[in-house]
Amino acid sequence: MKETRNTSQKDIIRKEIMLQSDHLTADQIYVLVKEKMPCISRATVFRNLKKLAEMGEIGFVPTMDGADCFDYRNHNHYHFKCNECHRLFDTDIPYDENLDKVDSEFKILKHETLFYGVCPECFAKHTV
Ligand SMILES: [Zn+2]
Ligand SMILES: [Zn+2]
């Protein structure tokens, strides 16, 4: 019984993330899910997010300022964090599969790269 309940909560959380076109922090997702399931606790949402990310159903982007983000795109791609507006972007930088094949005593499955800098919108503000 408990399993079914967990599954449906997870499904609702996953569906909510899939509806988004942006990267969201766990807290932002919690607010969205709470609108659908007012009784759900923050801890439950966080636990399910972690599980979904571990299962590879959603992407997870750790950031240095602590606002880790979840991503509806679960294919491998690189991210860019703007130092000025602090938004997180998907980049068009091609994912380098060769890096996953490097010789190592560790079995590499994937890698994450986060680029830092200034996004085009913020950059444009400097030149006006
Ligand atoms: Zn920016
Ligand atoms: Zn992304």
Image (cartoon, rainbow, N blue to C red):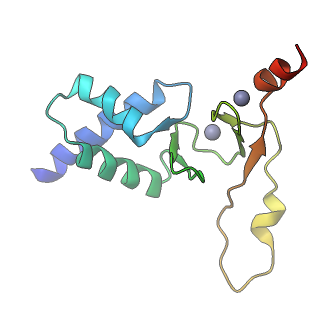
Q: Is residue 47 above or below residue 9?
A: below
Q: Position of residue 14 (x, y in %)?
A: 39, 37
Image quarter for ligand 2: top right
Quadrant of the frame with the C terminus: top right
Q: Position of residue 87 (x, y in %)?
A: 63, 33
Instruction: Tell me which residue sits at (72%, 46%) in the image.
Output: 78
Q: Position of residue 17 (x, y in %)?
A: 44, 32
Q: Position of residue 38 (x, y in %)?
A: 17, 28
Instruction: Tell me which residue sits at (83%, 45%) in the image.
Output: 94
For residue 22, what is the image quadrant?
top right
Q: Nearer the viewer, residue 102 or 26?
A: 26
Q: Is residue 109 above or below residue 89?
A: below
Q: Is residue 1 above or below residue 107?
A: above
Q: Is residue 106 above or below residue 68?
A: below
| Left or right placement of residue 96 versus residue 86 in this view | right
Q: Nearer the viewer, residue 109 or 116?
A: 116
Q: Nearer the viewer, residue 10 or 121?
A: 121
| Left or right placement of residue 48 versus residue 121 in this view | left
- Residue at the extreme left of the image, as rendered: 1
Instruction: Tell me which residue sits at (52%, 43%) in the image.
Output: 69
